[in-house]
Image (cartoon, rainbow, N blue to C red):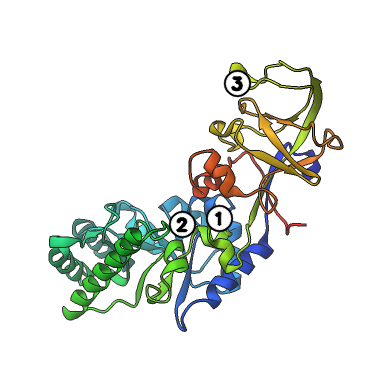
Amino acid sequence: MKIPDKRCWAEVSPENLLHNYHVLRSSLPGGCRFLGVVKADAYGHGALETARLLEKAGADYLAVACLDEALELREGGVTMPVLILGHTDARYTALLIGNDITQAVTGLKEAEAFSAAAQSFGGTLRVHMAADTGMSRLGFLCTGAELERGAAQLARACRLPGLDAEGIFTHFAVSDEPGEENERYTREQFRLFTEAIARVEAAGFRFRLRHCANSGAVLHCLPETALDMVRPGLLLYGYGDDAGKLGLRPCMRLKTRVLTVKTYGPGTTVSYGRRYTTARETRMGVLGIGYADGLPRLCSNHFSVAFPGGTAPQRGSICMDMCMVDLSDLPDVQPGDEAEIFGPGADLNVLSRAAQTIPYELLCSVSKRVPRVWKNFD
């Protein structure tokens, strides 16, 4: 099906993705590796296509959230190292080893389970140990009074037979949040992380890869937190309040088209719940996109869409498959014309604020029924 036949679609620019990769890569200290985060279908952009592009460009590692995502890449022909950041049950150890997938290990009992499973059939599982330094999520607990115990458990886990403890990582909780308090918290997390590593090394084990720099740290803390590898997520796709400071470009453009145009008199209510009433004679267009496509209903009446000739405010409650826009100030817009929901002409940050959420969520929310079209932006 050709693009003009689609009611809505997402254009993904390989040119912009490669541009962002090279910009970020060029900012790294010498010898620092690059891990591309492609979990959640590459933040909605398309994991397999993104992974293939990064592999060809020379990225060193990929990261996903779960085993299904890792297997999708392997089944699609991606051969570069892939790290699962989330939990995988030890009964899938043979599948991990057989597909050359690196697994995060989040505690001693889990490490022991992977070790036993790997030994049962004579294999070795490559793992990265996760250290919880203040995210309060997965990982060996390495905060406050637990640092000594956590480091000791890490050292013990690294020596278990059947495991190749290639790396260690932690995740920053507020590195992308402004303010001195957040910066202090991030630096304390980094201190705890490096202290845990130092204690493991003092016990006689050395990691080949240490990584902690997510998008926020790449923006605000490099080169201090770069260590052996960085793992930018949202930045790679050109989003975030500070992405423009690095010259990064949005990689996705969510588009739809005008299905019909009608003119209503003043006092006409629009859409479910009658939450908008026209104040004047209004030329109203219907767009072929709704909340089932990933446009949050919470945004109703709080954002505008972009046309080549200007912007049009959205009016009334967003429906499952459609929404309405006021075209009164854009008399040349006709049925069939394209509208941009977000992209270079319509800031995703503005839409995310209207939805009272973050850009990550909106990108990941673009539904599977919205076709991804890989093409460079006009």
Is the residue 30 above or below the residue 84 in the image?
below
Q: Pointer 2 and pointer 3: residues touching (CB < 8 Å)?
A: no
Based on the displayed image, in which of its 4 quarters is residue 287 positioned? top right
Image quarter in which the N terminus is found: top right
342 left or right, relative to 183: right
The residue under label 3 is 275
Mark closer to the observer (3, 1) = 3
Is the residue 160 above or below the residue 326 in the image?
below
Q: Cα distance, mark 2 to mark 3? A: 44 Å
Q: Position of residue 358 (x, y in %)?
A: 49, 47
The single residue placed furthest to the right in the displayed view is 332
Circle 2: residue type: Ala
Circle 3: residue type: Arg
Image quarter in which the C terminus is found: bottom right
Circle 1: residue type: Ala
Residue 47: give its label: 1
Q: Cα distance, mark 3 to mark 1? A: 38 Å
Q: Position of residue 42 (x, y in %)?
A: 53, 54
Mark closer to the observer (2, 3) = 3
- Given residues 281 and 323, the one toward you in this image is 281
The residue under label 2 is 70
Q: Is residue 328 visible?
A: yes
Based on the displayed image, in which of its 4 quarters is residue 165 positioned? bottom left
28 left or right, relative to 319: left
Q: Cα distance, mark 1 to mark 2? A: 10 Å
Mark positioned earlier in the residue sequence (2 or 3): 2
Is the residue 62 above or below the residue 286 in the image?
below
| Crowdedness near tag 3: few (<14), some (14–19) or many (≥20) residues, C-alpha within 10 Å | few
Is the residue 198 above or below the residue 264 in the image?
below
Mark positioned earlier in the residue sequence (1 or 2): 1
Where disc 2 sits, the SS reads: helix
